Amino acid sequence: MPVQPFRPQFMKIGVLTAALQELTPREVRDKDPDRAIEEWAAFAREVGADHIQLSAALHPTETDVPPEAMLDPVANTLDLRQPFDRDRAKRAKAALAGSRIGLSDIGYFDNMLHDDAAVRGKKHEFMRRVMDAAVLLETDAVCGFVGRNQKRSMDQNLVDFAEWFVPLLKYAKERKLTYRVEQCPMPGWTTSDNFHNNIAYAPGAWIALHRICEKHGVGDQLRIHYDPSHAILMGQDTRSLFQYLKDEGYGFLIGGFHVKGQVIDSRGVAAWGYGGQTMERGDWKDGEASANPADQLNAWKKQTVLCEHELPGTAKHDPLAYLQNRSVDWLDHQLAARELLTLDVPNTHLVVEHEYPKARVQEKDRLAPVLAGSIAFTRRIDEAAACMYALQHEVLAAQDIPAQGRGREAYRS
């Protein structure tokens, strides 16, 4: 009987630079934009990451959404108000190399299907600049949303996707890039009652979009940057979601991960259900959508009344929360990814995304140990899952020794 050696494979551990927007104060980085990348590279090494996901965004003076209406502060670690040329890229790469930090990809999270042609055009132009920067920085992917045209139905948005988003994928293809879509439904993006404002919010939608991409020759450019916090928000569990992709023949679609949890508040669910607060939020005044950006922030009660983001390692969970899909079972998450998805594990990125509100401090000295602890937790969870997978599916399987027990099962109710 053959003997299989024990050789666990680990994923790449990184952090999204939006975790600390003010690492380099804006008055400093506005004058010297690339200073922010230099300081984040050093900070990433300090907190124990191996890679960064570089956050890009329209500058607060250029965005169509006022900062007061945003749940998260503007995070433009990569500042693209001025052309990102080879000299800027050389400086950034030197900073990354000096701190021994890799670059997973560049993230720009915005609505690529905005109904206003001028606004949409500005966002697309910025995304193309992000792609050009990715080429100069020698990374192979960008990360972002698809978005939604608020004036049209979901089926009509599929038409808009083919007309408006596919050209972005063709631009990516010309540059040998992949566009990895994060699946957050972005319920607070609008004061309307729409909950799903990013049409790429679930596996059924991913498959529909990928089929459109295949018709246009850009199927290889569309991949998913899976974030389990959003699955929990929508009542899904990771293992069933991955199993569905495998069953449908789309286990290859997930190409990277955000490591961010969600803790469901049972009291909030009792009050409003999983659709969140639908009335008296404060984003409407006297029967009209408020023009005050600070009021518009209340649209996020569609999400925040029933859940709170978790920074991995910071939350204590009732074991029943795992069974009810009300929190992320991190160990099974990493194990299921290996068991059910088509992954090149050693080249797959796990990116810690910090959005736990109570720990979202903007002072470096306070945040550093928090991020260090979460990154260490993420690394050890992945290592544990890798060891379990190698032992159960390779070492024991080669000797025809069954693993004990059943573990979590997909679709179980």
Image: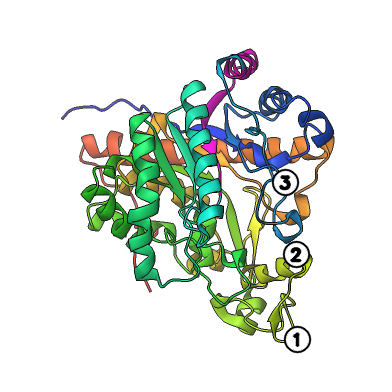
**The quarter of the displayed image where residue 302 is located:** bottom right
- Work out which residue is located at the far left of the displayed protein and give it: 1
Marked residue nearer the N-terminal end (2 or 1)? 1
Marked residue nearer the N-terminal end (3 or 1)? 3
The residue to which callout 1 is attached is 286
**The quarter of the displayed image where residue 263 is located:** bottom right
The mark found on residue 293 in the picture is 2
Q: Is residue 249 above or below residue 394?
A: below
| Mark 1 crowdedness (10 Å alpha carbons): few <14, some 14-19, many ≥20 | few
Q: Which residue range is magenta in the image?
A: 88-109
Secondary structure, mark 2, is: helix
User: Label 3 to label 2, Cα distance in Å?
Assistant: 13 Å
Q: Quadrant for the C terminus, please.
A: bottom left
Query: Position of 165 compared to 276: left or right?
Result: left
Report how many numbered discs are placed on residues in the image. Answer: 3
Secondary structure, mark 1, is: loop
Residue 203: x and y in percent read: 36, 59
CB under 8 Å between callouts 3 and 1? no
Query: Position of 25 compared to 43: left or right?
Result: right
Q: Nearer the viewer, residue 48 or 70?
A: 70
**The quarter of the displayed image where residue 261 is located:** bottom right
Q: Nearer the viewer, residue 41 or 377?
A: 41
The residue to which callout 3 is attached is 60
Marked residue nearer the N-terminal end (3 or 2)? 3
